[in-house]
Image: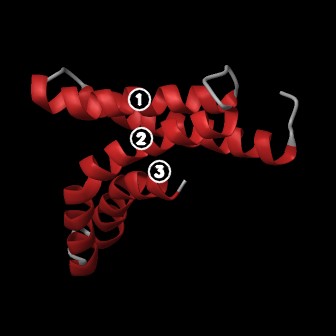
Amino acid sequence: MLLATLQVSMYLVRRINKHLFKNKNEALLKAAKLIKKIHPYSGALLVVTATVHGYMLLGGFRLHSGYFAWLIILTLGFYGWAGPKYKLQNWVKIHRILALALVVAVFYHVLKMKFLILI
């Protein structure tokens, strides 16, 4: 969850600086620059830890709420890697929409596992 928050924070920090401070807040500019540098590495780490998390807790891969979050993470990783490398059209928009879908999927998964929601 911490890695996913870090990943999403790149977008949030840039938007807050742009809309609230007209891109003039030096602390947010430095934070955005740092986050941008570590974003690909923490994304790869997120793919690995999500895979290990699911496999270790279930003893294999099974269809449940975390599986959908994991598939979104894999797709995000693919677009984050292939988008700029192969200059895929609209890859940033797709990457951001998938990030939003991941936030929803993770919240659902955590609520479902924590409180055993039946839906």
At x 52% / y 31%, what residue is drawn? 70
Q: Earlier in the sequence, mark 1 or mark 3?
A: 3
Disc 3 is placed on an element classified as helix
Q: Amino acid at mark 1?
A: Leu
Q: CA distance from mark 1 to mark 3?
A: 13 Å
Observer-nearest residue: 59 or 116? 59
Q: Position of residue 71 (x, y in %)?
A: 50, 25
73 relative position to 31: left or right: right
Residue 4 is marked as 3
Instruction: Name the mark nearer the viewer: 2 or 1.
Output: 2
Please give left or right for residue 94 compared with residue 99 in the image. Answer: left
Q: Which residue is mark 1?
A: 74
At 58% from the left and 33% from the top, the residue drawn is 55
Tell me the distance, in whole angstroms, between the alpha carbons under discs 2 and 1.
10 Å
Numbered circle sitting on residue 48: 2
Discs 3/2, front: 2
Local secondary structure at mark 1: helix
Seen at 30% across and 67% down, the residue is 17
Tell me if residue 118 comes above or below residue 88 in the rendering: below
